[in-house]
Image (spheres, helix red, strand yellow):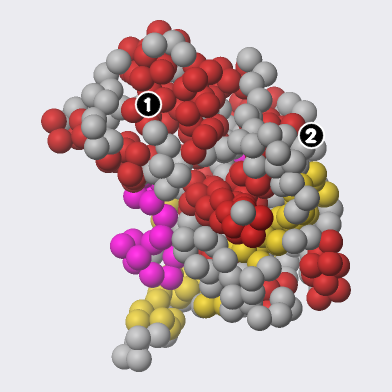
Amino acid sequence: MENLSGNSEIAERFGDLHPPLTAQAAIAEANRCLNCFDAPCMGACPTHIDVPRFIGKIARENLRGSALTILDANVLGASCSRACPVEVLCEGACVLHRYNKKPIEIARLQRFAMDAFHRAGGRLPLKSAEMRAEKIACIGAGPASLACAAELRQRGFAVTVFERRALPGGLNTYGVAEYKLPARASLEEIELIQALGVEFRYGVEIRTQADLDELEREFDRIFLGVGLGAARRLGIPGDEHRDVIDALEFIARYKTAHPPQVAQSVAVIGAGNTAIDAANAARRLGAENVAILYRRSERHMSAFAFEYEHAKQEGVQFQWRVIPVRIHVDASGIKSLECAQARVNEAGVLEAVEGTAFHFDCQQILYAIGQSPLLELLSSVRGIELSNGRVAVDRATGLTSNPKYFAGGDCVNGGREVVDAVADGKRAGVAVAQAFEVVHA
Ligand SMILES: Cc1cc2nc3c(=O)[nH]c(=O)nc-3n(C[C@H](O)[C@H](O)[C@H](O)COP(=O)(O)OP(=O)(O)OC[C@H]3O[C@@H](n4cnc5c(N)ncnc54)[C@H](O)[C@@H]3O)c2cc1C
């Protein structure tokens, strides 16, 4: 875990994209807020943080109060302040846009309050003094499970989180770009949840029916916060080469272990946010030439427009309507990626256009072409319905078709944002608690 213990090279190359506000700047920015009565910013936040309220408290220099307002709605308020695509959420909804003014810097204000809370050794408050007998298991230690676990623990339930990796946080720790959310900051935030008394068991992968039977015997309810599975391989000749790497693993490695060796020229396949983050990381780790190759056109890419612009500024190139066909390798390693131009045929299927083959010279290939949900695990759970490979739930509660199981986050929504996973986890936590409260009433 060299990086977490302070790898100066990574810190230098992945400095803050949005540096923290000074106290003076934060108070001045907080005082710009119009404190709108209908607060569209609050409605645009999936966790409905009371934005005017927390900003008002910063203006009055009540930083602890401000942080508690944030945490009441979103227990991962610190990581969301760094990772959220606020341009399309709270800041995008700020009424100042209507007056052609710069929106309030809600994310940086949120980070200001949360940083102060962490520095002062703040603790999460309990929501009930009563200790309850019911035991809840959360599978996965990503944002969805963390929010569910915190909510239930704050209400007095005994909660155990099972995580296959060595560290908690899911993609907050292992996936989100380091210049937005350093792994260290993700882990610091989780210490608050650990301090509540949530038990974490690391290196435990729940993957067989026997594992689930055991959990079902020990726990009253089980929350599935398993995220998405591994990326699909390219499935073309040469893709078994060691320098053809899952983009997510590449990111996880630089964030939590030794920085991976990058080649001079790197091809990244896919055009979602994972591909963009991996391409930016390859550039920052020293690759001279990084190109994202995508089989469809610019307007089909799933990455946000601002992420696309950012990648171009990082020096990433883009090639559209390109299908990888074969990887050429010799004894020294990868030589090139053979591609062809792509077109949609009459049946609506993408196909390579004959006679358009070209070689993209590269020594490393990162692939990020969608991820497949952990079907093995979920299909082994009796009676849990899936829809398009995702867990089908009641959106208001996160309840699955099996009354013992709740679910939320990427494994339900197919891959959205940290804040959506937190909202799901909290909603499920509240629903589980209410179900038992009704039973005991
Ligand atoms: C590269 C990348 C960059 C991103 N950047 C951003 C960003 O900048 N901003 C943003 O808001 N969102 C971003 N996202 C999306 C965001 O990270 C996810 O939406 C969010 O983390 C989903 O949370 P989750 O808890 O559902 O799943 P995850 O974060 O994936 O957590 C799932 C956890 O479950 C564990 N697990 C899985 N199966 C098992 C099992 N069988 N047994 C035990 N443990 C298991 C996994 O190891 C993992 O720790 C990014 C995603 C990626 C891939």
Q: Quadrant of the N terminus?
A: top right
Q: Quadrant of the C terminus?
A: bottom right
User: Which residue in the structure is indicated by mark 1?
Assistant: 53
User: Which residue in the structure is indicated by mark 2?
Assistant: 2
Taking 177 as reference, is 62 above or below it? above
Circle 2 SS class: loop
> Residue 165 got which mark?
none
**Which x, y percent locates residue 96?**
20, 30
Q: Determine the residue positioned at 39% across, 33% down.
A: 50
Residue farthest along the top direction in this orientation: 24
Q: Would you say residue 412 is visible in this rendering? A: yes
Note whether ligand 1 is within 8 Å of mark 1: no
The amino acid at mark 2 is Glu
**Which x, y percent locates residue 146?**
65, 46
**Which x, y percent locates residue 123?**
66, 25
- Check if residue 58 falls in the magenta segment: no
Q: Determine the residue positioned at 59% across, 57% down.
A: 438
Going from the N terminus, do you reach mark 1 or mark 2 first? 2
Picture quadrant where residue 398 is located = bottom right
Taking 217 as reference, is 72 above or below it? above
Crowding around mark 1 (Cα neighbors within 10 Å: few <14, some 14 to 19, many 20+) is some
Q: Determine the residue positioned at 65% across, 46% down.
A: 152
Picture quadrant where residue 12 is located = top right
The number of discs equals 2
The amino acid at mark 1 is Arg
**Which x, y percent locates residue 414?**
52, 65
Q: Which residues are magenta?
A: 285-309
Give the side of residue 100 with respect to residue 59, left or right. Answer: left
Circle 1 SS class: helix
Crowding around mark 2 (Cα neighbors within 10 Å: few <14, some 14 to 19, many 20+) is few
